[in-house]
Image: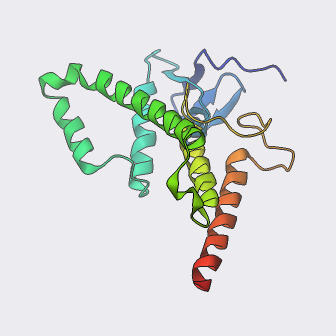
Amino acid sequence: MAEVDNTSPLLIKRYASRRLYNTETSDYVTLEDVAILIRKGRQVQIVDLKSGDDLTRQYLLQIIAEHESRGENVLPIEVLTDLVRSYTTQAQSVVPQFLAASFEILREGQSKLMENMATFPNPMSTMPGFEALQRQQQMFLRAMTAGWAGSSGPEPEGDAEVGKPPSGGKTAASADMDEIRRQLAELQKRISKL
């Protein structure tokens, strides 16, 4: 199979029936399929087949709304309130640049945190279970930054390509979650012995 060019947006056409059609794979996709593509770092462009209107923003907002309604709250009420206010104020022109810069700072900060954890000796490193806690934190940060396009966050360990299962058949995120569960069980055993 030919390698996909992740720099150009994947064109998804919306038909009059509101069904979404992936022009790359020549099949229909759901909104969740689009969300998965985005989490993997793919840029998408959703266009109305008849009018040619770009509907990408509308569908991205719909994905966010669905996650928020399922209790997967990422945006605090205060942020949502401020976003609503920004549509009627002078801040409307500044908010997009501010949000983009904030996410870039977050990615850079996570990358620097991981570098510092590996470089500088930590006084807590002599504490029992610290290494397991440190590995767990690294896996968490790796999982958090995995879906961000252009992430400067920590790279996946080993030779595994992003989005491809390692030789064991599990994805890197699934393997990380298994390792986190194993470490949590180990820590719980240690705590119960204390």
User: Quadrant location of the N terminus?
Assistant: top right
Q: Which of 74 and 109 is in front in this view?
A: 109
- Name the image quarter holding residue 166: top right
**Residue 154 in picture, x, y percent from top left:** 60, 36
In depth, the one of 14 and 8 nearer the eye is 8
How many marks do you count on the picture? 0
Q: Position of residue 45 (x, y in %)?
A: 52, 21
The way the protein has been coloured in the rendering is rainbow
Farthest residue toward the bottom? Answer: 193
Residue 60 location, quadrant: top left
- Camera-nearest residue between 109 and 10: 109
Going 59% across and 47% down the picture, which residue do you hit? 138
Side of 156 where 42 appears, left or right: left
* 8 vs 86: above or below: above
- Give me the residue at 20% from left, 24% from top: 92
Residue 164 percent location from the top left of the image: 77, 38
Q: In this view, does 37 lie to the left or right of 91?
A: right
Residue 155 place in picture, x, y as percent: 65, 34
The residue drawn where x is 41% and y is 58% is 71
- Toward the viewer: 11 or 95? 95
- Give the residue drawn at x 14%, y 28%: 88
Q: Residue furthest left?
A: 89
Q: Quadrant of the C terminus?
A: bottom right
Position of residue 160 in the picture relative to residue 173 (left or right): right
